[in-house]
Image (cartoon, rainbow, N blue to C red):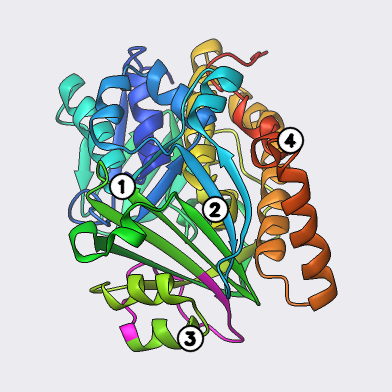
Amino acid sequence: MKNKPIIIIGAGISGLTLALALLKNNINVLIFEKEKEIEQRGAGINISPNGTSILYNLGLEKKINSFACKPVNIELRNFNNGFLLAKQNLNNSSEKKFKYPFFQAQRKDLINILFDEINKINSEIIFFDYELKGYEEKNNFVTVTFNNDKKVDGSLIIGCDGINSKVRKTLNPNASTEFSNIIAWRGIVNMNDLPKSITELSPTIWMGNEKHFVHYPVKKGNLLNFIGTVRKDEWHDESWHQFGSKEELKSDFGSANNIIEEIIENVDKPNKWGLFDIKFIKNWASEKALIIGDAAHPMSPSYGQGANCAMEDAIILSRIILKNNNYKGSLFYFQKNREGRVKKLQKSSSRNLKVFHIKNPLLKFIIYSGLYVLNKIIPIILMQSSWIYKFNASNIKIK
């Protein structure tokens, strides 16, 4: 079985990280992506120390430093009046406490460096315009069929194919997506189009009534990325590819302060998408099939851990595969190994979103006052997230 390649469905962050980790250890892989080219969406992502450690261990330290921003501070502010609730030094504190820095980058830049590193090892293993049709597990291998009716045999199939995963649908026929009543907006603004009052701001989280707005620099400070989430009663599309209008964006954040209004005014084509929960994902794994990343555990963006968690999945899976000579039981063990941490991350992300969106005036006063007072005493932002950032997927014990 090990003579056949591991088949990876999806050339996103989890799929490419997994492929690179396996290739560096002489494990053959084939990657199949349904799109016609590598992803070039410009959305920003946070890479926290638990993600940075992975990239550094893959030998990508110089590359990530070449395009990403290292935030000095992060601020929490009242959405309506701009009042500073908390301010935390990130990178000096982070590197002392967690050994690795924070980065903020464009998703496509991370995708591209992973893609380039894979091509240096083998430029003939990524296939575009291959959409998964189905797969069949056999005694010693798995046969994968694509919409072009081509078939490929592999030792394992790993679904890195996102929230609409077809591998997940086979493993969990009864799983269903459920709208969370939250939509998210993303956009990129050229820093040259913004006044100094904005370009000199630290990365900031603006907390409001049933909405929040986050902005931070990317591309070595040449661009500003933003994400805003707001409550909605209905949504009918799970795609990242839906463009919204500037007028819709203004409407959703109409009570914003001057800074947010200025950012919105300068965005060209904002993206919007609904945030979905997936119910009844009982099985991540079978003997020869597995789902990882958003395919297994979609994450609210409110903790900035989606990409980091996907990279953790990829590295831990690669280490499990390397340790097991015949792969038997490896995929079940992966689910057992990861499920506890992932569930805790999902709950923490959901709790963060509730705090960011809090509407009740009394609760808001209590929480905002607590943030303000505690921040004067202890580094509350890093402290409450220490269990996330100190995790090193390259070093944890694998049985």
| Residue at disc 1, secondary structure | strand
Looking at the image, is mark 3 or mark 1 earlier in the sequence? Answer: 1
| Residue at disc 4, secondary structure | loop
CA distance for labels 3 and 1: 25 Å
> CB of mark 4 within 8 Å of CB of mark 3?
no
Please tell me the numbered disc located at residue 168. 2
Amino acid type at circle 3 is: Gly
Residue bearing the label numbered 1: 218
CA distance for labels 4 and 3: 34 Å
In which quadrant of the rendered image does the C terminus lie? top right
CA distance for labels 3 and 2: 39 Å
How many neighbours does mark 3 have within 10 angstroms: few (below 14), some (14-19), or many (20 or more)?
A: few
Looking at the image, is mark 3 or mark 2 earlier in the sequence? Answer: 2
Amino acid type at circle 1 is: Val
Residue bearing the label numbered 4: 378
Looking at the image, is mark 2 or mark 1 earlier in the sequence? Answer: 2
Residue bearing the label numbered 3: 254
Q: From the viewer's perspective, is residue 256 above or below residue 116?
A: below
Q: From the viewer's perspective, is residue 328 above or below residue 73?
A: above
CA distance for labels 2 and 1: 33 Å
Taking the image as drawn, is residue 154 in sight? no
Looking at the image, is mark 2 or mark 4 earlier in the sequence? Answer: 2
